[in-house]
Image (spheres, rainbow, N blue to C red):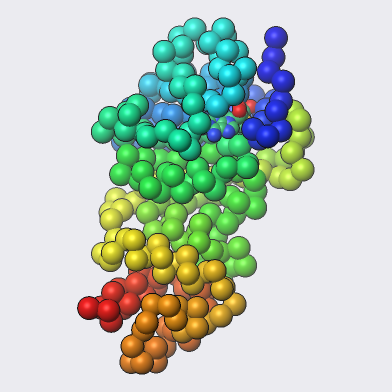
Amino acid sequence: MSVRAKKHLGQHFLKDELIAQQIADSLTEKGYNNVLEIGPGMGVLTKYLLKKPLKTHVIEIDTESVEYLQAHYLNLAKRIISKDFLKINIEDYFGKEQVAIIGNFPYNISTQIVFKTLENRHQIPEFSGMFQKEVAKRIAETEGSKVYGILSVLTQAFYNVEYLFTVPPTVFDPPPKVDSGVIRLTRKENYTLPVDEKLFFKVVKTAFQQRRKTLRNSLKTFNLSDNLREDIIFGQRPEQLSVQEFINLTSKIEKDAS
Ligand SMILES: C[S@@+](CC[C@H](N)C(=O)[O-])C[C@H]1O[C@@H](n2cnc3c(N)ncnc32)[C@H](O)[C@@H]1O
C-alpha cells in the first residue's frame, strides 16, 4: 500500500534515500529538542529524523498519508498532527519550547510556511528544507540580485540563510517541472530589531511592490518630510539596499514621524 499523489496538496514524493538523509542531516541539532516535519507524506525523511536524539513530530494535512504513517511508524503515532500547518497555533503543541522545522515542503504553500516561521521566530531556532529552486534562491540571495526581494530581506533580518544543494526533478514521484533547492535558516543570536518591527515589514513590502521605482517614489505613502526625501538613500531602488540598510531606512522613517 502506498499513498496516491494528490496534485492539489503539492505531493511529490522523494524516491532518493540519500537526499532524504542529507536533508535530515542538515539540522545542526543545536538549541532545541523538538523537530516538526511539515508534510511527511509516506515518511521518507521522517525515518532519518527518528534516528536522531530529538523528539520528532510531524504535521500532515492528507488523511491518507496520516493513515499510512500510523500503520508504518508505530513509534511516531502519538506525535502525528493531522492538521494544516498554516492553521495551527504552534504554542498549542509545543508550549514555550523551541522547535526546529524541516520538510520537503509542498510548493504551493512554501512561501506561506516561511512567513509563518518568521511570525513564530521566537520559537523556531532553525528551519531546513526543500523548496522550488527559484524560491530557495529568492530567500538566500543578497542585494543586487534580480530575485532579491521581500522574502530575502524579511528572512535574512532574523536568520542566517545557507543555500545547501540543488535537487533534480528525477528523484521525485511524480517529478515536478522544475529543480528544487535545499536551504537552512539559522536564527540570529539577536533576532529583535532595533526599530519598530511592524514598520520594518511595512517599509520592505511597500518598497518592493514597486521595485523599479526609487524609494522616494515608492514610499510616498509614509508622508516623509522634505528633509528626509533628500536623503541619499531615497534615491535608490529597493534591490540595491542590504538588510542592514533597510533597518537604517526604517529607523530614519521612524524618527522622521516622531
Ligand atoms: C512535496 S510532498 C513531500 C512528502 C514527503 N515528505 C516526501 O519527501 O516524500 C509535500 C507534503 O506536504 C503535505 N501538505 C500539503 N499541504 C500541507 C499543509 N497545509 N499542512 C501540512 N502538510 C501539508 C502533502 O500532503 C505532502 O505529503
Compared across the picture, whether 217 is left or right of 198 comes to right
Task: Estimate the x, y position of residue 214 in percent, counting from the top left.
Answer: 52, 82
Q: Is residue 248 visible?
A: no
Q: Quadrant of residue 30?
A: top left
- The residue positioned 64% from the left and 32% from the top of the image is 9
Above or below — where is 248 with respect to 34?
below
Task: Estimate the x, y position of residue 178 in percent, counting from the top left.
Answer: 74, 45
**Position of the C terminus by quadrant:** bottom left
- The residue positioned 62% from the left and 67% from the top of the image is 146
Task: Estimate the x, y position of residue 177 in percent, counting from the top left.
Answer: 77, 43
Residue closest to the far left: 258
Indicate which quadrant contains ligand 1.
top right
Compared across the picture, whether 158 is left or right of 212 comes to left
Name the one closer to the observer, 180 or 197. Answer: 197
Number of marks drawn: 0
Q: Is residue 238 visible?
A: yes
- The residue positioned 58% from the left and 12% from the top of the image is 67
Compared across the picture, whether 122 is left or right of 4 comes to left
Name the one closer to the observer, 45 or 199. Answer: 199
Above or below — where is 252 with respect to 24?
below
Compared across the picture, whether 96 is left or right of 188 comes to left
**Position of the N terminus by quadrant:** top right
Task: Estimate the x, y position of residue 27 in percent, counting from the top left.
Answer: 45, 35
- The residue positioned 52% from the left and 46% from the top of the image is 112
